[in-house]
Amino acid sequence: MGAGVVSIPVVLGGVYLFFERETTIRPESYGYVGSETCGTCHVLNYPGWKGTLHATMVQEATPQTVRGDFDNQNEYWLHDGVRGPAPPDDRVLVRLLRDWDEYYAYIYDPDTGRMNPYRITHTIGTAFRQTYLVESMGTFFRVPIQWSVKQKRWVNLWNRQTAKDETLTGPMELFLNPHARWNETCARCHTTGYRLEGTGQWSEMGIACEACHGPGLEHVNYFLDSKLRRLRSELLKAAGSEPPTYIVRPSKLDPEKSISVCAQCHQADIWLKNVPRYVGFEPGEDLSDHFYEIPLEPDCQEPPSNKTWPDTTPRGPGVLFRSFAESRCFLEGGVTCIDCHAMHDPGEYRELLRAGTASDDFCLRCHEGIADPIETHTHHRMDGEGSRCYGCHMPRLIEGLEMVGDYDYGRVRTHELDHIPYPESSVRFGGVEEMPNACNECHADQTSEWASEWATKWWGPRQEIQAEIDARIAASGGGQAEQKTRGL
């Protein structure tokens, strides 16, 4: 297809009008047309999506997109990654420089003793941390340090995740490691229309429209040249019917297929054998057969991304999605990711995604039985943090998402909405350091025994809580693991 004119229906005062816009549809392999083509007609959703973190996930390195300090605080030394005093062979391992509108990373090569220059082509991420790519022979490689947007400093993220001290050979080893080959390791979740060809190919950098809605060529072909089809589609929607659109709408899928759209990237706890299934995934398919394959064993530490707490509660970043898939809100209530997360408007759900009355009202749409008065359910003041739904049902239990918060290993909220991390678990497994609970997240100056006593005063005998913990452990086959946790 080439250049053409598209007529877009608009309803004004109950009357359907059309206005025309020029568009160029590029013939793309595998049916992908690109987000700019989508924006030609979807003039409301497209600008909103452009302001999301999905849209800005991968960008060309320019003065407008680079957030790291390439001018002043632009050196990463050996001692930056070493615990304790600076080592005697301390030196600069990575130096970041800016030359007008171009950016370079100089990486120390221990074999030659030189700082090898690499031109940075793209940025990855904007809000929490930013990674930089360089290109060599058609393959992108990650620069071995990242910029922490929150902390405003350079960090060696890979060594931090493996809890290893830095060495003189570390950055170059990380740079040349197969896991640093962005095309093969990372691109499937950071691009749209990814396919295994050569070193990896994609239709568009970043998480664009077709990552969630599927290839758009058939949809475009159906609507582009026919005002009648577009008018018929609008009339059917106004009448409450679902017209044929030949595009995937996650909000119209069943819950398993809807959250599969998000799971293609956000379900990190997958077996390597399933990677081809996820690479070849297209919206509308069902990945739910793989949601629960990796067992949630008590106090699992390996691999770090799939860590759990002693009662099998998800702990590592790899099981953040899993925590939601385990919830009754999803399993029984059919709640999906897009009920809470807006993909087209970064500001629409801003209040929903933080603890407050807006998020409470959202939860109480289904749980209206506990709303009047809410203090009967929470035993806290209605206007206090203790009456926020987030506080008990989404405490910060997921760790390992470095540089997200104000601290290196700031935790983020679990999505296992119906299971409350009780203080009884902390008492049983050695305190809040070994097993956090929802109460002591706010009452950090008190003990888990104190919190358990108050829970008993408010809600009566708690034998069923111990039974629930036992059931979780038994379901995982984790009796021996629990004994190890408790030192028995």
Image (spheres, rainbow, N blue to C red):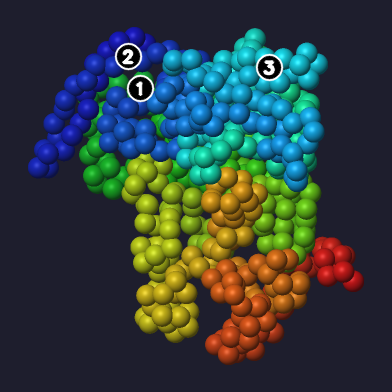
Say which element carries label 3.
Answer: strand
Identify the residue at image location x=13%, y=31%: 17
Q: Amino acid at mark 2?
A: Thr
Residue 5 in the image, given as x and y percentages of width and height: 24, 16
Residue 24: image tag: 2
Q: Is residue 362 left or right of residue 17?
A: right
- At x 33%, y 32%, the residue is 46
Q: Residues within 10 Å of mark 3 (few under 14, many from 20)?
A: some
Q: Residue at x 43, y 63 (%)?
A: 355
Q: Secondary structure at mark 1?
A: helix
Q: Which residue reaches farthest front? A: 88
- Near-viewer residue (487 or 303): 487
* Label 1 vs 2, first from the N-terminus: 2
Image vertical order of residue 443 relative to residue 64, above or below:
below
State the mark number for residue 469. Answer: none
The mark found on residue 37 in the picture is 1
For label 3, the residue is: 115
Q: Is residue 189 left or right of residue 483?
A: left
